[in-house]
Amino acid sequence: MEKGINPRWRRLEKELPLVNPVYPGKSPVYPANSTLCPNNWGHRSGIVIFIMLKKHRVHIAVVFTLMLEAIFVLIRLKPYTETEDSLIYERWFDFTQGFLVLLVLYSIFQIIFTRWKQYRQLKNEHLKAQLSLLKNQIDPHFFFNTLNNLYGLSIEKSDLVGPYILKMSEMMRYTIYRGAQETVLLEEEVEYLRQYIGLHEERYHKEVEVQFDVNMENPQLAIAPLLFINLLENAFKHGVEPLAKEAYVHVRLQATMQEVAFEIRNNYLRRKNADSEGKGLKNLQQRLSLIYPKKHQLEIKELPEEYQVSLKIEVA
């Protein structure tokens, strides 16, 4: 046997006519297209993986191509792992096995992740459609109440009609444009509630005790729009308006970095028939379930002479 020639190359040379065209007397080399060549195989696999990363849309097909090539390599390497002095083949065999297992696990993970992503996308689209429908129900309800208030002022030929229309237009603008957003600043929502309270204070001739206490640690806190207006509307519509005197509405909003608490207490007169006073509340409950699932608490207490509503929302 010639010196410097490894016995395993001799065995391969008998099975595969391998030659070294540069140094005929030295160890043979693999042909460039040989699947058994570790360097060549790794080079081609690296190119394919690079393509997989660059062309993300076809990565599944590329992964399966790599899996097939890994299987073929295992088949070709298996006979050489059972010969003498086969350490290098055993290492490449084990490496290819591990690589194949990783490809299988990656494929399973990718399929599960893709299905989960599609499910989340469909769920978000359904959620947005439901919220859009509920928001579209808020706008007519608000406009209906404000137009009734404007009609009452116009009959009285009050000088408050002009300023009332101006303030009402500002509130409508907020309802249409800001209400269409996913979130608004808490201070904007508070200002919107102040404007609504101001409209009603200008409208009533009778004395109405209105208190609005606000305590915010972070006025820039993001929150879903138009969550509190239905509760405030109900307090004025079903509490203040039917009462001839001594009506009151006490509103309290307290916000920390983790939670927003909104409370309303108002006196009222019991009525047997209340046709539509529950629609706004049902709308609010549905929106809360969609936007803040398991992160809100709405409590309503109907006492003999006082109506109490408490809404707590976890925002962190």
Image (cartoon, rainbow, N blue to C red):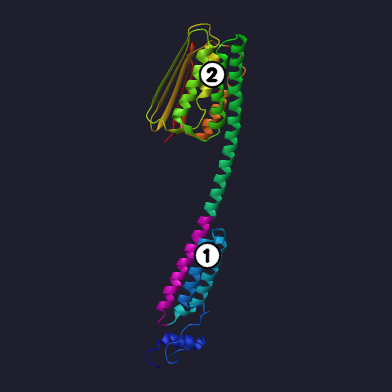
| Relative to 135, 303 lies left or right | left
* Depth check, front residue: 88 or 223: 223
Q: Quadrant of the C terminus?
A: top left
* Residue 115 percent location from the top left of the image: 56, 51
Mark with earlier residue (1, 2): 1
User: Where 58 sits versus 291, above or below?
Assistant: below
User: Where 98 sits versus 161, above or below?
Assistant: below
Residue located beneath label 2 in the image: 234
User: Where 83 sits versus 265, above or below?
Assistant: below
Single out the mark in the foreground, 1 or 2. 1
Q: Are marks 1 and 2 in contact (CB under 8 Å)?
A: no
User: Where 266 sits versus 293, above or below?
Assistant: above
Residue 16 is inside the magenta segment: no
Residue at 57% x, 16% y is 162
Q: Secondary structure at mark 1?
A: helix
Residue located beneath label 1 in the image: 51
The boundaries of the magenta stretch are 84-110
Q: Is residue 272 visible?
A: no
Q: Quadrant of the N terminus?
A: bottom left
Residue type, mark 1 in image: Ile
Q: Secondary structure at mark 2?
A: helix
* Depth check, front residue: 206 or 30: 206
Residue type, mark 2 in image: Asn
* Residue 74 percent location from the top left of the image: 50, 73
* Depth check, front residue: 12 or 41: 41
User: Please, which residue is most extreme toward the top here?
Assistant: 245
Task: Check disc 2: other Cα within 10 Å, few if <14, some if 14-19, many if 20+.
Answer: some
